[in-house]
Image (spheres, coloured by chain):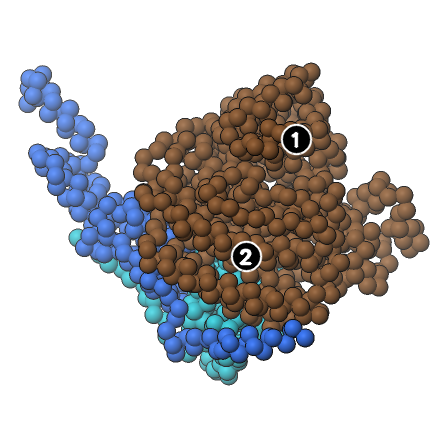
Chain colours: A brown, B cyan, C blue
């Protein structure tokens, strides 16, 4: 939907929301829907279960929206139903279209939209696990909860206490013994992995033909704690510890969602300080990733030097906020720590020093023959596949999609600075590396511009009131991609709080990326999406010989292979064994 | 192993210990600080400490994370594979006290609760040191290792003050 | 051959290692370490225990004392307790060398004596909190050492006496 008005439109403004409202009324006129405005740039479309798939098809395919996330909520004490919210984002307008369906408590099921919008695949399994809302029309399996958790206890329902400890349930082991080759177990504790994940690889020569995966080792029940034990003021601290590397993005996203819902006017100085610390976190995360990537390629000198430079950023972060990581300066209504003139001088001096060193180091590092050859041409993700899966972050930008939350859904002080969004079209590992390298230099320039224009004034708002029953979303460009939080306010604490981290959207993209890959290239390809499993808590699906997604049970693998590809090598191998 | 044997074993290991890093569900904050300790600014390799690939080669296990329910049987397996004397350094507020989510449905509650479960399974941990912090600084981790090995005396002591 | 520039980069960087513990650690002036509660200033109100996200500061009333316990092991070093304390009794130090072999060494307890109600004899609040709450309120000495249930009964009795409805 491009016309001349869209190009000059201020994204996310009231005018943009009105334009989208008119568009939706036109397109959805023959379905019985009710369209209403929620907080800020969000529109809610209430639709019955019967028409859910048609509406999703129009919004996703015809209007060109991207899937952002979907949320299940237990609203039985409000209207006797379970609600499912599918959140689509229109990048051109900067507006979110939230499609809401209700399922009554005695008939708890909704139709699946995973074949229309593959980006929503895992969200549906998630609300099936945690809330017990059944999804019809697709294969289902357990995703999040531990293996020994009973089947009928759903933690996020309002009548289940947050500290419930059911006794373990024994399940029989699913083993893939019918295939000829033995399984190679990798993990959960393995030198190449920093987090516990479990893979069982079935290989033929150097190519992987089958995999069994069990994830979600890091599921800690954060959303349930936020809805039942902690209050509004305490949640920024738990949100920051969702991930130790991109934690400040999560805490900023949460406070922004609450401030939008309660219409709190945050002082401009606080917005600038938040943006500065976000960019500092981005530089730190990209330098960390470069070090880890070099280490995986076998170039340890690169690892040591990149982390040597990164130490200056950690010290800077501690100087500005009080802690090397998990800064703890975000509160609802502003920030807790201020920046004075002396700190600004020190920041600028450190940035000059870092910029010089990074330029020299990366110039040299990307010309090392082993690094260049291993990164070029491996792990290709085409533009069509990236669009279908709604990937986010550097993975999307390296495959030709110009998506960046700082430009599409502007927030904080980014509207006062000018910066470039690097986009490459090849979609291989080298493009993803170059996108991140360029983003480091762009971040340094953004911090300089922000410090130049820092306005004076307060850094926080003391008095505010949060009304219940408001639906709000907020999103932030984390180093790994777009991070989105969904919030329904309640009394004293949120009624429903959902976090969708960027790696969650990017992991399905591993399937086409690992197609026809050699075993040796798999680690760097997996690392190139910058996976952060503690943000994600999701199942990683590995590749088969044809690079397809395999699910946990073998029966599903065979069914999937038979359904999708005429040349079924897996079942041929089965028949011959 | 009697107490006398443990102390002499620890003394013999003092020159260069091999560590294994075990993440039982942490947010990665303490884990990147553990990796940071290997990088040039802090450089634990000057003490002879190196990261190994299997618990069977390890002298000390660097334990992070609040022990989630899913990871519990796997952690027990990994700790059973360590040879005696088993020494554990519990790093971060998650491992020492369960962290900010110590009473959630999916979390066991940190290393002290895990130690009770291990006693029931018959796995004896010879020595544990606790390093608080969120995340624990690399310097605090180095101090923790030195306390575990008996090179430095711990500074923290229980305090009880009564007010009228 | 550009990759040989690594030697130039390495030589320029030199040796950056801080030989902790024989040299000073890299701490800045803003660092948040362990907190210290000043026993002179603390009144036992419990505001810090309400805000603490991981419940590292807990308050429990047992018998004649109110116990305020600080468990360093679960502390996340956020500093919110220092911001909400009404008497500024909490200071944030720069102590990070907190490793111990015994987990009980990480507990810091503060025991406040509780005042017994003049009428029913049950302990209810700490001495210092009563003094703090009543210091700017004139005429409150009558109710200062009476527990909430007895206080409501006493004030109704006094109102009735004042109105002349009760012959006492």
In which chain is the residue bearing label 2?
A
| Image x and y of residue A202, in percent | 79, 58
Q: Which residue is mark 2?
A: A440
Compared across the picture, whether A529 is left or right of B147 comes to right
Q: Residue pushed farthest right?
A: A576
Respond whether the residues carrying marks 2 and 1 are from the same subunit. yes
| Image x and y of residue C49, in percent | 33, 46
Residue closer to the observer: A116 or A9? A9
Q: Which residue is mark 1?
A: A2
Residue closer to the observer: A469 or B90? A469
Contact check, label 2 and label 1, Cβ < 8 Å: no
Quadrant location, the C terminus of chain A = bottom right
Please tell me the numbered disc located at residue A234.
Answer: none
Residue A52, compared with residue B140, is above or below; it is: above
Residue placed at 48% from the left, 43% from the top?
A: A414
| Image x and y of residue A476, in percent | 52, 43
Residue neighbourhood size for the residue with mark 1, other residues' Cα within 10 Å, grouped as few (<14), some (14–19), many (≥20): few
Is disc 2 placed on a helix, strand or loop? helix
Tag 1 or tag 2, which sits nearer the N-term? 1
Residue placed at 56% from the left, 70% from the top?
A: A304
Residue closer to the observer: C121 or A75? A75
Compared across the picture, whether A27 is left or right of B42 comes to right
Residue B97, compared with residue A222, is above or below; it is: below
| Image x and y of residue B137, in percent | 44, 64
Q: Which of the 4 image quarters holds residue C29?
A: bottom left
Compared across the picture, whether A84 is left or right of B102 comes to right
Residue placed at 10% from the left, 25% from the top?
A: C158
Compared across the picture, whether B67 is left or right of C26 comes to right
């Amino acid at each position: 939907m491009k016309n001349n008005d869209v190009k000059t439109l201020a994204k996310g403004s009231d005018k943009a929301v009105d334009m989208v409202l008119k568009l939706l009324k036109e397109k959805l006129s023959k379905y019985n829907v009710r369209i209403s405005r929620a907080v800020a740039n969000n529109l809610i479309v209430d639709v019955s279960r019967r028409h859910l798939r048609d509406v999703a098809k129009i919004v996703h395919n015809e209007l060109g929206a991207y899937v952002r996330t979907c949320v299940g909520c237990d609203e039985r004490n409000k209207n006797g139903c379970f609600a499912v919210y599918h959140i689509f984002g229109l990048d051109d307008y900067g507006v979110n279209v939230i499609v809401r369906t209700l399922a009554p408590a005695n008939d708890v099921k909704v139709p699946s939209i995973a074949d229309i919008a593959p980006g929503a695949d895992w969200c549906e399994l998630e609300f099936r696990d945690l809330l017990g809302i059944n999804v019809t029309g697709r294969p289902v399996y357990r995703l999040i909860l531990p293996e020994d958790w009973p089947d009928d206890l759903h933690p996020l329902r309002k009548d289940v206490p947050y500290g419930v400890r059911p006794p373990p349930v024994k399940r029989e082991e699913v083993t893939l013994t019918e295939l000829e080759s033995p399984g190679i177990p990798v993990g959960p504790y393995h030198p190449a992995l920093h987090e516990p994940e479990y893979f069982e690889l079935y290989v033929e020569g150097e190519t992987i033909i089958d995999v069994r995966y069990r994830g979600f080792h890091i599921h800690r029940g954060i959303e349930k704690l936020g809805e039942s034990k902690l209050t509004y003021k305490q949640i920024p601290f738990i949100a920051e510890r969702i991930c130790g590397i991109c934690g400040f993005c999560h805490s900023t996203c949460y406070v922004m969602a609450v401030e939008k819902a309660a219409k709190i006017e945050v002082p401009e100085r606080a917005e600038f300080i938040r943006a500065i610390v976000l960019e500092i976190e981005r530089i730190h995360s990209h330098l960390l990733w470069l070090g880890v990537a070099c280490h995986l390629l076998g170039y340890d000198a690169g690892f040591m030097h990149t982390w040597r430079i990164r130490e200056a950023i950690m010290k800077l972060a501690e100087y500005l906020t009080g802690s090397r990581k998990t800064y703890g300066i975000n509160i609802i209504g502003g920030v807790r720590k201020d920046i004075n003139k002396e700190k600004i001088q020190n920041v600028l001096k450190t940035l000059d020093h870092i910029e010089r060193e990074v330029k020299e180091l990366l110039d040299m590092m990307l010309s090392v023959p082993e690094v260049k050859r291993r990164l070029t041409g491996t792990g290709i993700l085409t533009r069509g596949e990236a669009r279908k899966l709604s990937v986010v972050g550097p993975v999307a930008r390296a495959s030709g999609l110009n998506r960046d939350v700082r430009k599409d859904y502007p927030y904080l002080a980014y509207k006062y600075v000018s910066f470039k969004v690097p986009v490459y079209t090849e979609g291989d590992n080298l493009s993803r590396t170059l996108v991140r390298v360029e983003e480091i230099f762009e971040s340094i320039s953004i911090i300089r511009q922000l410090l130049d224009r820092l306005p004076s004034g307060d850094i926080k708002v003391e008095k505010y009131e949060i009304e219940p029953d408001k639906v709000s979303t907020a999103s932030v460009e984390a180093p790994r991609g777009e991070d989105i939080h969904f919030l329904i306010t309640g009394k004293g604490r949120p009624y429903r709080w959902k976090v969708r981290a960027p790696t969650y959207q990017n992991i399905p993209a591993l399937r086409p990326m690992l197609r026809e890959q050699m075993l040796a290239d798999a680690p760097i390809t997996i690392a190139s999406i910058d996976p952060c499993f503690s943000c994600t808590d999701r199942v990683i699906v590995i590749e088969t010989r044809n690079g397809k997604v395999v699910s946990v049970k073998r029966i599903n693998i065979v069914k999937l292979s038979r359904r999708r590809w005429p040349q079924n090598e897996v079942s041929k191998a089965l028949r011959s064994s | 192993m009697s107490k006398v044997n443990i102390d002499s074993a620890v003394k013999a290991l003092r020159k260069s210990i091999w560590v294994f890093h075990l993440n039982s569900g942490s947010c990665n904050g303490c884990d990147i600080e553990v990796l940071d300790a290997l990088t040039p600014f802090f450089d634990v390799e000057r003490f002879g400490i190196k990261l190994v690939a299997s618990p069977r080669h390890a002298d000390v296990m660097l334990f992070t994370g609040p022990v989630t329910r899913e990871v519990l049987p796997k952690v027990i397996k990994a700790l059973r594979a360590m040879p005696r004397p088993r020494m554990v350094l519990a790093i971060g507020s998650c491992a020492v006290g369960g962290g900010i989510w110590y009473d959630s449905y999916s979390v066991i509650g940190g290393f002290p609760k895990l130690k009770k479960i291990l006693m029931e399974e018959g796995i004896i941990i010879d020595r544990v040191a606790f390093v608080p912090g969120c995340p624990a600084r690399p310097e605090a981790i180095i101090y923790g290792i030195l306390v575990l090995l008996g090179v430095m005396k711990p500074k923290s002591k229980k305090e009880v003050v009564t007010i009228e | 051959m550009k990759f040989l520039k690594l030697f130039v980069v390495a030589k320029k960087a030199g040796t950056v290692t801080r030989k902790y513990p024989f040299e000073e650690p890299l701490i800045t002036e803003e660092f948040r370490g362990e907190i210290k509660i000043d026993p002179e200033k603390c009144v036992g109100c419990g505001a810090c225990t309400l805000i603490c996200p991981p419940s590292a500061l807990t308050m429990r009333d047992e018998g004649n004392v109110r116990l305020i316990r600080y468990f360093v092991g679960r502390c996340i070093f956020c500093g919110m307790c220092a911001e909400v304390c009404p008497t500024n009794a909490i200071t944030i130090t720069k102590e990070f060398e907190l490793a111990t072999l015994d987990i009980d060494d990480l507990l810091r307890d503060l025991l406040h004596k509780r005042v017994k109600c003049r009428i029913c004899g049950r302990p209810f609040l700490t001495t210092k909190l009563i003094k703090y709450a009543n210091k700017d309120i004139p005429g409150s000495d009558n109710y200062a050492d009476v527990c909430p249930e007895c206080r409501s009964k006493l004030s109704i009795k006094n109102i009735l006496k004042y109105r002349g409805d009760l012959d006492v």
